[in-house]
Image (spheres, rainbow, N blue to C red):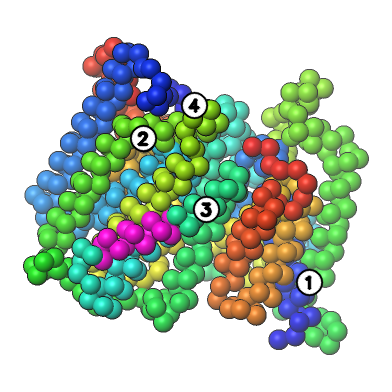
Amino acid sequence: MNVTILLLSGLAVGCIYGLVAAGFSMVYRAMGLVNFAQGDIMMVGAFIGYSIIVLGPGLPFWLVIILAALVTAALGFLIERFAFWPAVKRGADQIYLVLLTLGVGIVLSNGARIIWGANPLVYPTPITHETIMLANYPVPGVYPYIAAVMILLVIGLQFFFTRSWMGLALRASADDPQTASIMGVNLGFASALSFAIASGIGAVAGVLYAPITFASPDMGLIGIKAFAAAALGTLGSIPGALIGGLIVGVGETIGGQLLAPEYQDSMAFLLMIAILMVKPTGLMAGGPRT
Amino acid sequence: MNELSVPLSKPDELPQSSGQRRAANWMARGDWLAFVVLMALLWILPLALGGFYLYLGAVIAIYAIAALGLQVMVGLAGQLSLGHAAFLGIGAYTATLLEKGIGLPFLAALAAAGLAAAVAGLVMAQLIRLSGIYFKIATFGFGIVVYQAMTNWSSLTGGHVGVRGIPPIEIFGVSFTTRVDLFILEMITLTVIYALLVRLCHGRVGRAFRAIGQNEAAARSVGIPVNRYRMGVITLGSGIAGIAGAFLPHLMRFLSPESFTWYDSLIMLIMITVGGIKMLPGAVVGAALLTIIPEYLRDFTQYKMLVFGVMLIASMALLPEGVVGAFDRLIKRFVPRRGQGS
């Protein structure tokens, strides 16, 4: 195996982890909720993308990504409203909240199994089979999309959170709920919106990931590596989550190849534990609030 | 909700009012009563009904032991573990490999299983220096690492293929081969562990666990060595899971990593939540419910996890104190008592 190719596939997978991790971090920061359903939301997003491709075969891939993100964001909004917000609002303890997100995750992954079937689905779109030549090596055709989406999302989120009123309101209500609510921010809506955006980003990750692997109900399990990514990049920090995702992606691909490919999943957690032992609050400045 | 369900007990050093002592006694009495009722049911019903019910009883006993360990960890001391199945697995593999490999007698293998899982728990407990939420994610990671080791370390564990030909149980030259024998051995173990845990929970250590579970900072401020207790409870819960695990291959006559996946950790968490988190009897009731219900959903196997997920959410929304808590409330309505109830 060539190092360049390994690095490239590590970075691509890392981007996916980073995106899911960013959603995970956003929700944590906005609601203090460790959302173990984030990976399952990504999985639902991938299936919604599949259905969109089936319903509208001619749609360009970038439009599929956007539509899937919107539909999943709406779904996330509803999940937040009906499942999580009531519990967060009455100040339920951490264990209760974690169990609740686990429950929602189980319902999502098994619900998807019933709707879309248990077998992995291949995206019926040319991008699944296309390869492009990069430095004389064939790489999956979806890689440029991943790179482009990653760059656009980083710029977009940065702009959203620092320039737009809504983004500022979300950050304000995450950092100081009381003051924000005095300033006229509707806290309930703000956290639902954060959750919806996180779900949308998760769906983007799912749709981008599906052509590399398949869309399957067990796909949500890559969400667990996203947790490791979010944790080592400091929970609550979006840039940290993205960087953490890249570290986990590259680390497990190269580490797995060098040491033992069958232990790839463990690699992510060992990496996380090692980094947290040295820097207990993750790589970014500041720690989690709780 | 938190403050209501379990009154915050103070450590022994502080003076207790007689009212508090009476409340504590009443709590202990409730737990012992539940212990007697549950153990009686679980001893008698499978033996009386026999056949398939005996098998169900044997499964319930194993998971009840493991869930009790988890309940002490999560429900009482508030140390959420998302990788409990790993310790069940460590126990199962330790016992089986020792019995099969070097012909160790069952009791020694059982002790070794508990010990191995406890040591693994102690290793995981070192991670408590990571702050709260990171520790939860690390326990999850621990479960994944152990599962991958079980699947991939084929020379030791047999990998995905698993281990067949589990030797029969032999204690002091007497072999226990029938299912009734196995059930009785399991139930003795369960009864002893359950009784010890009830005692533990109403003593000084149990009060310290509960104080940590409710408010770590407050517990530290009244002089409880929080970190030592946290490590202790994780080691204890893991060790108990290891003992439960040692029985599993004898019942299934087969051992494979697939019994110790992330879903199995999840199911044990659902057990203690549905049964009643923070309450020891909740673990036993939850283990029984989650073992029996799927048997009546045989035609809908693919919906099993969906049903569990819905059960988890529904019980959290409708019965936040679980089945045992709801039952407790029902009894209290008819039997009024003075002082704070449990």
Q: Chain of mark 3?
A: B
- Up the image or down, B279 lies above or below A215; here it is above
Q: Residues within 10 Å of mark 2 (few under 14, many from 20)?
A: many
* Res B11 label: none
Residue lying at 36% horizontally and 71% vertically, measured from the top left: B256
Left or right for A10, reference A272: right
Residue carrying label 4: B222
For the magenta stretch, what is the residue range? B109-121
State the separation of the CA atoms marked 2 and 3: 21 Å
Quarter holding the C terminus of chain A is top right
Residue B276 at what x, y percent from top left? 37, 36
Q: Quadrant of the N terminus of chain A?
A: bottom right
The residue identified by callout 3 is: B126
Q: Nearer the viewer, residue B203 or B290?
A: B203
| Number of other residues with Cα within 10 Å of mark 3, as a class: few under 14, some 14 to 19, many 20 or more | some
Q: Secondary structure at mark 1?
A: helix
Q: Amino acid at mark 2?
A: Gly
Asked if the residue at tag 4 contacts the one at tag 2, i.e. Cβ–Cβ closer than 8 Å, the answer is no
**Mark 1 and mark 2: Cα distance apart in space:** 55 Å
Q: Are marks 1 and 2 in contact (CB under 8 Å)?
A: no
Residue B229 visible in the snapshot: yes
Q: Tag count in the figure? A: 4
Q: Are marks 1 and 3 in contact (CB under 8 Å)?
A: no
